[in-house]
Each structure stands twice: as structure tokens, then as C-alpha cells.
Amino acid sequence: LLRLTNEHAASTVLSETQIYYPKSWDVDIETLRRLEKGDYQAVIMDDTCFIREPDLTAFAMKQYNKGASVVIVGLEGIFDLSTLNRQFKVNWKCAGYTARSIELNDLGKQILGDAFHLIITM
């Protein structure tokens, strides 16, 4: 999942089938190159994408270096924050995690599924 918010606050949500090749599940580099031409206020992606997909991480960091906010949603519950610490030059530690109890609309349920949130302290 990759969500981009442009400078006019319009959002684009890209699903897995839009950023990966369907048969190989490799990142679609052509799509990323096209997206890199845009200026975004925010890039929102899940923790697995950020940690395990170097091309998507590089895309997010390019946008971050251009001034965009980057939000990493803890969908998979990856508690090793070393990648985030290294990329953003921070020293976050996971203090705990919680289950969530949120009433979502159908799109929210489709996007988030049964994710839980990380509580991160600096």
C-alpha cells in the first residue's frame, strides 16, 4: 500500500497491483519513476513496504528529502526500528503496542485490515 498526498491535498492510493508486477510481485520501477516526478506533501506506506522494498524506501526518502512528510503505518508489527532509525537519523524505541478499536468505513477496512498500532517514543 502506498498513499501519496500532493501539494493541493488531493490523495492517490496505489494498491499492490498498481505498484507491483502481478506475476513476479517485483516493484514496478516504471510506475515509481513516473511518481517521482510529482511533488507530494505526504507519503504513507506500511512498515513491510518500507523495510522490505528498497525501491519503495528510496522513493519515500526522496520525497522526504524534498520536504514531504513520511508516515509509516505499523500493519505487520515489525518491532525492529533500526531501518527507520537509520533512514531518518533518529533513535526511536518501541515502548509497546496496542490493539485498536476503531470503526472504519469499507475503504478503511480494505486498506487497514486487522492492523495494530505501534507506540513509538523518541
Image (cartoon, helix red, strand yellow):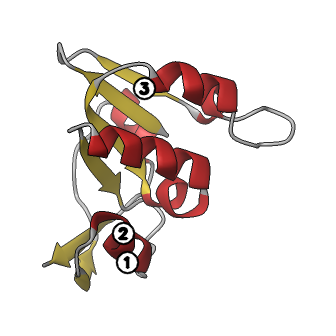
Marks 2 and 3 sit apart, C-alpha to C-alpha, by: 22 Å
Please rate how many residues cluster around mark 3, counting C-alpha atoms within 10 Å: few if below 14, some from 14 to 19, many from 20.
Answer: some
Residue where numbered disc 3 is placed: 13
- Helix, strand or loop at mark 1: loop
Spot occupied by residue 95 in the image (x, y as percentages of width and height): 21, 86
Q: Give the camera-side residue of 108 and 19.
A: 19
Spot occupied by residue 90 in the image (x, y as percentages of width and height): 23, 74
Callouts 1 and 2 close, C-beta under 8 Å: yes
Residue where numbered disc 2 is placed: 84
Mark earlier in primary sequence (2, 3): 3
Q: Quadrant where the C terminus lies?
A: bottom left
- Helix, strand or loop at mark 3: strand
Q: Give the camera-side residue of 82 and 45.
A: 82
Identify the residue shown where x is 52% and y is 60%.
48
Residue type at numbered disc 2: Leu
Q: Which mark is residue 81?
A: 1
Residue type at numbered disc 1: Leu
Residue type at numbered disc 3: Val
- Helix, strand or loop at mark 2: helix
